[in-house]
C-alpha cells in the first residue's frame, strides 16, 4: 500500500479514514476523490496530520476518464471506496442519485481498476487491492429472536439506499470472482462520531437538543441499530487492507444494540451534564415521537466473529465512551457546526423531511 485512492474522503467516514491513515501510515500518498455533494465538506479535512502526502481531487466517481487518468497519474495500488449517497430517508425521498453514485459509480471504479491493473499492468494479487466499503443494511431487518447477520446471511435490502449498496456489493463480488480483481468487501453497522453530517440520528439529536428543539423519534423508537465508533471502523478497514484475504467479505460492528429511544435519552442526559440549561433541561422532555419512516427496518445486529478470529480486530470504544467523545466533539467544534448548519441545502432538507411528520403521542 503506497498510493491510495480514497473515494468520498470529504464525507463522514472517508474524512475520518484520511485523518486516521495519515496518522498511522505516514509513508502513504493519499489521493482523495470527492464530488463535494451536500454531504462532503473541506471542513472535514482541516487540520490533517502534516506527515504523509495528501492530494484532493474535486470530481465524480462516475467520470470514467477522470478515474482512469487518476489511477495512471498517481500509480494507484490501493482503492478504498467510500463515496456514496448514504442516507436512507433521502433515498426514500429521491432514489435516483443512489442508483447513479452507488451502482454506476462503483461499476465505473471497478472497471477502471480492472483495465488499469489487470489489462494494462498485468499486476499480481499481492500488489494491488480494491476495498469496497458497504453496510449491514444489505441484509435487511432482523426479528427479535433472529441471530445477528453473518457474512453468509442472504441479502434482503429494504430501502432504495440498501438496495443500491447491495447491487454495488454484487457487482464488486463478480469482479473478484470473474476477473480475479483483488478485492475485499466490508459490511459495517451504523457509525457515529466526529464529522457526521447532522441528517443522521446521533448528530441531529445532539444539535437539536443543544438548541432546545424537538427531538424527532420515528415510530415507537424501539428500532435497534448496532453502533460503532467511526475510528474503530477506520481501524477495521486498515486491518482488512493489511491482513484481509482478497475475495473475502468481512462484517464489522460495535457489538452493542440499544434502541433508538435509549440512544436519544443518553444524548439528552450527556448534554444536561455538559451544558446544563434550566430553560430546556431535562432535555428528555424535548423527545417527540413522529410519523415513522416508510419500510423502516426494525433491527440490525452484526456477528463479527470472522474479523475478530482471522484479523484480530474488535471494537475499542464502548457506546458510553464513544457517545461522550462524540457529544464533546460537537460542543468543541463550533465552527464546523456553524458551517454545516447554515448550509441552505441542509435547512431545506430539515424542512422537507420533518415538517410533514406529525407528533404521534
Ligand atoms: P457521507 O454521506 O457522509 O459521505 C459520502 C461522501 O461521498 C461525501 O463526501 C460526498 O461528497 C461523496 N460523494 C457522493 N457522491 C459522489 C460521487 N458521485 N463521486 C464522488 N464523491 C461522491 O457517507 P458516510 O456516512 O461517510 O459513508 C461512507 C461509506 O460508508 C458509504 O459507502 C456508506 O454506504 C458506508 N457506510 C456508512 C455507514 C454509516 O453509518 N454512515 C455504515 C456502514 C457503511
Ligand atoms: P440513521 O442515522 O438515519 O441511520 P440508518 O437509517 O442508516 O440506520 O437512523 C438511525 C435510526 O434512527 C433509524 O432507525 C431511524 C431513526 N431516526 C429517527 O428516529 N429520527 C430521525 O430523525 C432520524 C434521522 C433517524
Image (cartoon, helix red, strand yellow):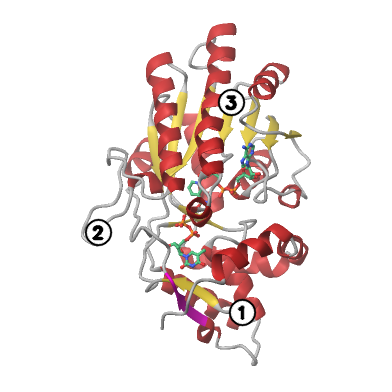
- Residue at 65 percent across and 35 percent down: it is 25
Q: State the image coordinates of residue 68 (x, y, percent, origin top left).
A: 65, 19
Considering depth in this image, is 23 or 206 the residue closer to the camera? 206
Above or below, comparing residue 151 to residue 283 in the picture: above
Q: Who comes first in sequence, dot 3 or dot 1?
A: 3
Work out how far the residue at label 3 is from the one at label 1, CA to CA, in angstroms.
Answer: 44 Å
Q: Is residue 94 left or right of residue 330?
A: left
Q: Is residue 295 left or right of residue 33?
A: left
Above or below, comparing residue 173 to residue 211 in the picture: above
Q: Who comes first in sequence, dot 1 or dot 2?
A: 2
Instruction: Give the magenta part as a residue range.
Output: 287-291
Q: Is residue 333 left or right of residue 186?
A: right
Mark 1 residue element: loop
Q: Is residue 255 visible to us here?
A: yes
The question of residue 38 being in magenta is answered with: no
Considering depth in this image, is 25 or 19 the residue closer to the camera? 19
Ligand 1 image-quadrant field: top right
Mark 2 residue element: loop
Q: Determine which residue is flagged by label 2.
A: 143
Q: Determine which residue is flagged by label 1.
A: 213
Q: Is residue 313 visible to us here?
A: no
Q: Quadrant of the C terminus?
A: bottom left
Considering depth in this image, is 161 or 306 the residue closer to the camera? 161
Q: State the image coordinates of residue 270 (x, y, percent, origin top left).
A: 56, 77
Work out how far the residue at label 1 is from the one at label 2, CA to CA, in angstroms.
Answer: 33 Å
Work out how far the residue at label 2 is from the one at label 3, CA to CA, in angstroms.
Answer: 38 Å
Mark 2–mark 3 contact, CB under 8 Å? Answer: no
Q: State the image coordinates of residue 221 (x, y, percent, origin top left).
A: 40, 72
- Residue at 31 percent across and 41 percent down: it is 155
Mark 3 residue element: strand
Can you tell which mark lies on residue 78? 3
Amino acid at each position: 500500500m503506497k498510493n491510495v485512492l480514497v473515494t468520498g474522503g470529504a464525507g463522514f467516514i472517508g474524512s475520518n479514514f484520511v485523518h486516521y491513515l495519515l496518522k498511522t501510515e505516514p509513508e502513504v500518498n493519499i489521493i482523495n476523490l470527492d464530488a463535494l455533494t451536500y454531504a462532503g465538506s473541506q471542513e472535514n479535512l482541516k487540520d490533517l496530520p502534516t506527515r504523509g502526502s495528501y492530494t484532493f481531487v474535486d470530481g465524480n466517481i462516475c467520470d470514467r476518464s477522470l478515474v482512469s487518468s487518476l489511477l495512471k497519474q498517481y500509480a494507484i495500488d490501493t482503492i478504498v471506496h467510500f463515496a456514496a449517497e448514504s442516507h436512507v430517508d433521502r433515498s426514500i425521498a429521491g432514489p435516483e442519485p443512489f442508483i447513479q453514485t452507488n451502482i454506476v459509480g462503483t461499476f465505473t471504479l471497478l472497471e477502471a481498476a480492472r483495465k488499469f491493473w489487470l489489462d494494462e499492468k498485468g499486476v499480481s494479487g499481492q500488489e494491488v487491492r480494491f476495498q469496497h466499503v458497504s453496510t449491514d443494511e444489505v441484509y435487511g431487518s432482523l426479528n427479535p429472536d433472529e441471530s445477528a447477520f453473518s457474512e453468509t446471511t442472504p441479502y434482503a435490502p429494504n430501502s432504495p439506499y440498501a438496495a443500491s449498496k447491495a447491487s454495488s456489493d454484487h457487482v464488486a463480488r463478480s469482479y473478484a470472482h470473474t476477473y480475479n480483481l483483488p478485492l475485499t468487501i466490508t459490511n459495517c453497522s451504523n457509525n457515529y462520531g466526529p464529522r457526521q453530517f447532522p441528517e443522521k440520528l446521533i448528530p441531529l439529536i445532539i444539535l437539536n437538543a443543544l438548541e432546545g428543539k424537538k427531538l424527532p423519534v420515528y415510530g415507537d423508537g424501539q428500532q435497534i441499530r448496532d453502533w460503532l465508533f467511526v475510528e474503530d471502523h477506520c481501524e477495521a478497514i486498515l486491518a482488512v487492507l493489511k491482513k484481509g484475504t482478497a475475495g473475502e467479505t468481512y462484517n464489522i460492528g460495535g457489538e452493542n444494540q440499544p434502541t433508538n429511544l435509549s440512544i436519544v435519552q443518553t444524548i439528552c442526559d450527556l448534554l444536561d451534564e455538559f451544558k446544563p440549561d434550566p430553560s430546556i433541561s431535562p432535555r428528555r422532555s424535548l423527545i417527540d415521537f413522529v410519523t415513522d419512516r416508510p419500510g423502516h427496518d426494525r433491527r440490525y445486529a452484526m456477528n463479527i466473529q470472522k474479523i475478530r478470529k482471522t484479523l484480530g480486530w474488535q471494537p475499542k470504544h464502548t457506546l458510553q465512551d464513544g457517545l461522550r467523545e462524540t457529544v464533546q466533539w460537537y460542543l468543541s467544534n463550533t465552527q464546523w457546526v456553524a458551517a454545516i448548519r447554515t448550509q441552505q441545502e441542509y435547512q431545506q432538507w430539515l424542512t422537507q423531511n420533518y415538517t410533514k411528520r406529525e407528533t404521534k403521542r
